[in-house]
Image (cartoon, rainbow, N blue to C red):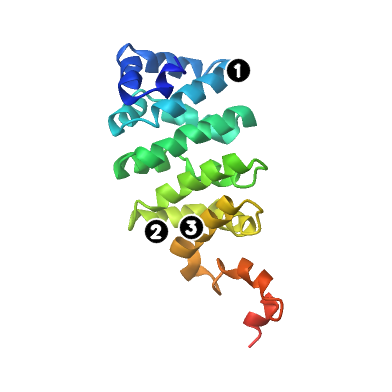
Amino acid sequence: MGNIVTGDDQQTQTIIQVGALPSLLSLLHSPKKGIKKEACWTLSNITAGTKLQIQAAIDAGLIPPLIRHLAEAEFEIKKEAAWAISNATSGGTPEQIRYLVEAGCIKPLCELLGCGDAKTILVALEGIENILKVGPPDSEDYVQQIEEADGVVKLETLQNHLNNDIYSKVFSILEKHFNAEEEGPAPPQPELKFNFGTPAPQVFNF
């Protein structure tokens, strides 16, 4: 079933129409790690589908257990749940994204920014960026939630990450959504490492 939903939207829709979502909900509560991981992976391909397919996952009650796995499960399960939530933020409507936030996805996404796996960090960053793209007034509340989850601290730490994709996405998020709340222009600071004649602290020594 997981392989089928990696296909096109019509193949995914077929799986939904034959009643797979309630079964996947049950499997998310399995005591077996492998089954929960495969269920999250399957759902990540469903939430990568159309807005109607994302809504079907919401209506089937799949989001709360996905977010619980995102927050509490072993890392192998957690990263698949991250894909499922991030994919939903990517293709979902503003209303669907608001539902994900209300269900509590921001804090566990922020926590994943501190994991050691670059690919998972990028998935979490994508989710956070998509959430912030919903725009005001919602995005103002989301900024606050990210700050309360220590997300800004983690984002600033990632400015020193060796992965260029991570650095670029972090820079963009900080510049667009958090720059005004910093004492100085935080996102460009890594560039100062290449300006050897002017140590970064001197910028603030008036």
Q: Along the horizontal axis of the image, is 95 left or right of 154?
A: left
Q: Along the horizontal axis of the image, is 40 left or right of 131?
A: right
Could you say whether the residue bearing mark 1 is in a helix, strand or loop? helix
Q: Please name the residue that numbered disc 3 is placed on.
A: 173
Please tell me which residue lies in front, 162 or 181: 162
Q: Which mark is residue 140?
A: 2
In the image, is residue 199 above or below residue 16? below
Mark 3 vs 1: CB contact within 8 A: no
Q: Which mark is residue 129?
A: none
Could you say whether the residue bearing mark 3 is in a helix, strand or loop? helix
Q: Crowding near pointer 2: few (<14 within 10 Å), some, many (20+)?
A: few
Image quarter hosting the C terminus: bottom right
Q: Residue at x 30, y 41 (%)?
A: 93
Q: Quadrant of residue 78?
A: top right
Q: Could you tell me how far apart the alpha carbons at marks 3 and 1 are, in whole angstroms? A: 34 Å
Amino acid marked by disc 1: Gly
Please tell me which residue lies in front, 164 or 60: 164
Amino acid marked by disc 3: Ile
Q: Along the horizontal axis of the image, is 44 left or right of 120?
A: left
In the image, is residue 144 above or below residue 37? below
In the image, is residue 135 above or below residue 68? below
Q: Residue at x 35, y 15 (%)?
A: 15
